[in-house]
Amino acid sequence: MNRHPSPVSRRRVLLAGAGSAAALLGPSLGGGAAAAAGRPRSGAADSLQPYASYWFPDSLPPGTPGDGITWRSLKAWTPGSDRDLAFNTATVPLAERFTPVPANTTARAGQARISALAAFDHTAGNPSQGSSTADYYAPTHWAYLDELVFWGGSSGEGLILAPNAPVVDAAHRHGVPVLGTVFLPPVAYGGQLRWTRDLVQKDAAGRFPLAAKLVQVATAYGFDGWFINAETGGGDAALAADMQAFLRALRAAGSGHGLRITWYDAMNRTGQVGWQGALDELNQPFFQDDAGPVADSMFVDFRWSAGRLADSGRLAEQLGRSRYELWAGVDVESAGWDSATDWDAIIPGGRDHVVSYGFYRPEWTLHHLPAERTPGQFHAADDRFWSGEGLDPTRPGGTGGWRAPASAVADRSTLTALPFATSFNTGHGLRWYEGGAVTSGSPWNHLGLQDRLPPRRWAVRTAGQRPEVSLDFADAWRGGSSLLVRGALDAPATLELFPARLPAGSATVLDLTHRLDPASGPVTVEVAVALRDAPSPGESAPYSFLPAGTLAPGSGWRTTSLRLGSLGPGTLHALGVRLTGRGGAAVAWRLGALAVHDATGSPAAPSGLTVTGTATADGATAVRLRWRRTPGPVRHYELYRRLPDGTREFLGGTCGTAFYVPGLRRARNEPAARLEVRAVHELFTVSQPSRTQLPW
């Protein structure tokens, strides 16, 4: 999967007849100084900024790296020498998932799944803990994904890329494993065969030291394995044999840690690069050999055909493997939902799926929009990509050729234990809200702060006009966004939010925080709760409706608490809301938070908040902070500055125990900046603070 030095799409290269046109084109600029084009030069104030890690296997390129790029050897890496390790370590465990009754009659459970290869930034200069912009790819349709590949790497920056912690934490919260990337580029794009040989080198005992390093990185950083993409031509059968043995060693070393390997269909058993577009005898040894599995899955190059995929699925089963461990590549980088795809070759209607599939660059949903795009526009496009043109997974069909994932792949959910809470925070926003009040007016992104979000966007059942449902950034109860239902309610409308497997008893309480926008008509709200699954795909769960009051415009945020004991003991299988308007008047109702719990409480305070580094330039001071983890369960930590007038200003949050704050400036004549960190519970209750000061 080739990283081209310019943002030319793979399809344009194919049309131009480029020699390595079968390869993918990646996000990174090709080499040296060009790779950092348009970026500011590093200065004293940003010298502390932590970035996602990237390496060459061993030997480094000739010459000097471009501005903002650091060349590193993975072979020389150790956790103790990694000054950014605490900032790059993911801490959210991989959640277990279940598959509810599908939302429609065409989606299938237990068949095709989806992988996604997504680029979140350049290889170099990718901030470890978010940044001060809301213009960021914030994926939320985790329910359809089986793995996410953190896409990157280039010959001018580094070939091995570890995912940053916010992406891993968000994915893990939704039960999705994340893979780092190992990229050995074609010669035409800077690839050198010595880097392939570096990767598969053996020590005196015949072991593969770089395999051990890859396992060490994944376990230290908290992600789930590696996507291996060997596209440098010029090899031979001996090098291919070494690569296969390397993969086997990597899989064996990582299996005890739950790590996985996805192999890209490029190098074959001859050592040459020959994108097969299939699983066949030339690339089979990298997927399965006589001794068993070599890789956990294979990403099949885009030159597949219906016949090749059918043959590939049959071969996988003959090897004792699942045909759904093969990802058929679907390139959406340049055309998104207008991409020409032979869907019947992968997920035919009316019969079993042939193989799984992998999206290349689904962040198109962000980047195809105008430069002045808003977070709301991005999420509207992303909802259409995953749910279909009608924005309703219960009716996912459309007029074009796009076959949205919701139409074929059964969604999954992680709601299996109490407590559960969400504030519908997408992990980016134009402001930060707490209790409905703005505590930071600055745009931000940090995917690690993303909540669990409704997987079926948006399933609405009504006999009348269907209201518009969206994630909205104009107001929120907590975080950066809320759920907004808007339109003329000429009949009651039930919005299905979460499939669940939550235990419920006499003490179980459901909390609903909601409000109306000023121009809205009144709305009567009921909570929809089902103790049984839907009877069949596409049908509604058998809801009971619990009154949550009637809201009038101008009443502000209201939290309604409902005891579920009247339903009797059991398991909550579905959660939603039913809204009833008055006289068909237009409404604008916001859901700011939803929680289900048996008890409440606040976490213990973190301790030992310490400034571990500072750097000052142009009157601004950057700060690195550390603290000790709070005992017991913690969702994340939030950092604040206490201003001279006593108000608290939100600085950011993280799931880890280290944080970087850029650009602090002295407020009036304060002798020191007063900094605080608080632990946040799953129910969003907060601890007492741990405090420190930064003297001016």
Image (spheres, rainbow, N blue to C red):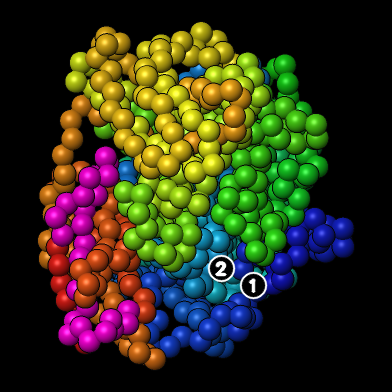
Q: Say whether residue 397 is visible.
A: yes
Q: Looking at the image, which residue is at 34% across and 37% down? A: 558
How far across and how far down the image is residue 312, in percent?
69, 33
How far across and how far down the image is residue 586, in percent?
59, 33
**Which residue is denoted by mark 2 in the rendering?**
122
| Quadrant in which residue 287 is drawn | top right
Give amino acid for label 1.
Answer: Leu
Left or right: where does residue 391 sit relative to residue 666? right
Q: Say whether residue 219 is visible.
A: no
Give amino acid for label 2.
Answer: His
Q: Looking at the image, which residue is at 27% across and 44% down? A: 684
> What is the span of residues highlighted in magenta in the rendered image?
664-689
How far across and how far down the image is residue 62, in percent?
56, 85
Residue 148 badge: none
**Which residue is denoted by mark 1 in the rendering?**
29
Determine the main secondary structure of the stretch shown in magenta: loop
Q: What kind of element bears circle 2? A: loop
Number of dots carrying numbers: 2
Q: Relative to residue 630, is residue 492 depicted above or below?
A: above
Split into 4 quadrants, where in the image is the N terminus? bottom right
Label 1 crowd bin: few (<14), some (14–19), many (20+), radius 10 Å: many
Q: Relative to residue 450, is residue 484 depicted above or below?
A: above
Q: Looking at the image, which residue is at 14% across and 63% down? A: 690
Left or right: where does residue 298 sit relative to residue 169? right
Q: Residue 674 lies in magenta, yes or no? A: yes
Closer to the camera in the image, 488 or 649: 488
